[in-house]
Image (spheres, helix red, strand yellow):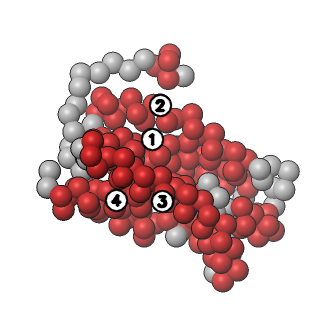
Amino acid sequence: MDDRLKRRALYGVMLSVFLAAMESTVVATAMPRVVESLGGVQIYSWVFSGFLLTSTVTMPLWGRLSDLLGRRPIFLTGLTIFLVGSALSGAAQNMGQLIGFRMLQGLGAGSLMTLGMTIVGELFGLEQRAKMQGYVSGVWGVASLLGPLLGGLLTDHASWRWVFYINLPFGALAMLLLHGALPEGQRRPHRLDYAGVA
């Protein structure tokens, strides 16, 4: 794989990881307006917990699926699920819907966090790998810091719904970067341990 495609894949991974990391914190500053709009003050903590729960629990599953079916299709599937969850979260009409859609968003985010580092590790040799993975880790830190600020700005100057909708154009750009740059990867004969997954 030539250096241009590697850089393109790196930018796509970094952008995807940025979006997933930002979603962990961006909602915090929007929640007073969300509760004002949707109600559900008794269960609003599940907007955060549901996202973190589904993203964390599914990380090993995404890793295993990418081993069996290839990195590119599984990473792009996870990114698609994340973006669908983002769009639906922005369109939620009550707190129960928002929690469910955030859980869907977290399901996709689990793949982005897990596979991002794996893909970078496979694209770059040992002499470059630590540096590139450092960039991805740095993106995570920056996203965590910018999330609350961006959430407050979007909520004050647009709508709390844009806390979720903002992911869509950047996610589409990440998809475009990754689709042409990531190799298909090898598929292995597979048998999934359904009891283990459960």
Q: Specify which label sits upstream in the sequence, 4 or 2.
A: 4
Residue for badge 3: 139
Depth check, front residue: 28 or 95: 28
Q: Specify which label sits upstream in the sequence, 3 or 4.
A: 4
Q: Residues within 10 Å of mark 1 (few under 14, many from 20)?
A: many
Depth check, front residue: 82 or 14: 14
Residue 114 is labelled as 1
Amino acid type at mark 3: Val
Q: Residues within 10 Å of mark 3 (few under 14, many from 20)?
A: many
Amino acid type at mark 2: Pro
Q: Specify which label sits upstream in the sequence, 1 or 2.
A: 2
Labels 1 & 2 near each other (Cβ < 8 A) = yes
Disc 4 and disc 1: Cα gap in Å? 14 Å
Labels 3 & 4 near each other (Cβ < 8 A) = no
Dot 4: element: helix
What is the x, y in percent for residue 21?
Answer: 54, 55
